[in-house]
Image (cartoon, rainbow, N blue to C red):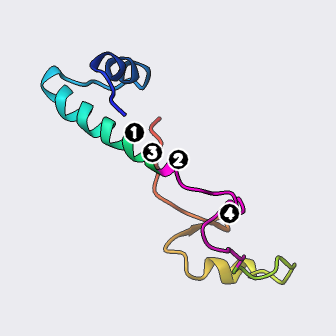
Amino acid sequence: MKITSEEIKKIALLSRLTVKEEQMAVVEKQMSDILSYMDLIGEVDLTDVEPTAHAVPLRNVMRADEPRKSLDHGEALSNAPEEENGYFKVPKVLQD
């Protein structure tokens, strides 16, 4: 499928991209190649192919979400580089 320079300019405008005139021939060829490939893919017979959300089956590999005992407050603070009034003390990240 052939795409025109005007169509490329319109697509660039809508997608907020800048395509310089010296790049136009390269972009035109690349987009035409992509659209030709899409036409080729559209010719594939998919009548017996079941639609899927993923190419490979997925499964959840995380543990079950069950309540369990958490760290003791003192144990959590034991590895902190600095602690102040029972809280983690971290460097200031916001300016006044």
Q: Quadrant of residue 22?
A: top left
Q: Is residue 88 left or right of residue 92?
A: right
Give the mark, 4 or 2, whose residue is nearer the N terminus: 2
Judge by depth and name the residue closer to the eye, 45 or 30. 45
Q: Position of residue 48 (x, y in %)?
A: 70, 63
Residue at left 71%, top 79%? 62
Check if residue 51 falls in the magenta segment.
yes
Query: Circle 1 sits on which residue?
Result: 35
Residue type indicated by callout 1:
Leu
Mark 2 crowd level (few <14, some 14–19, many ≥20, 10 Å Cα): few
Give the mark, 1 or 2, whose residue is nearer the N terminus: 1
Q: Are marks 2 and 3 in contact (CB under 8 Å)?
A: yes
Secondary element under disc 4, as helix, strand or loop, is loop
Residue type indicated by callout 3:
Met
Secondary element under disc 3, as helix, strand or loop, is helix
Q: Position of residue 56 (x, y in %)?
A: 62, 73
Residue type indicated by callout 2:
Gly
Region rendered in magenta: 41-60
Separation of residues labelled 1 and 3 (CA atoms):
5 Å
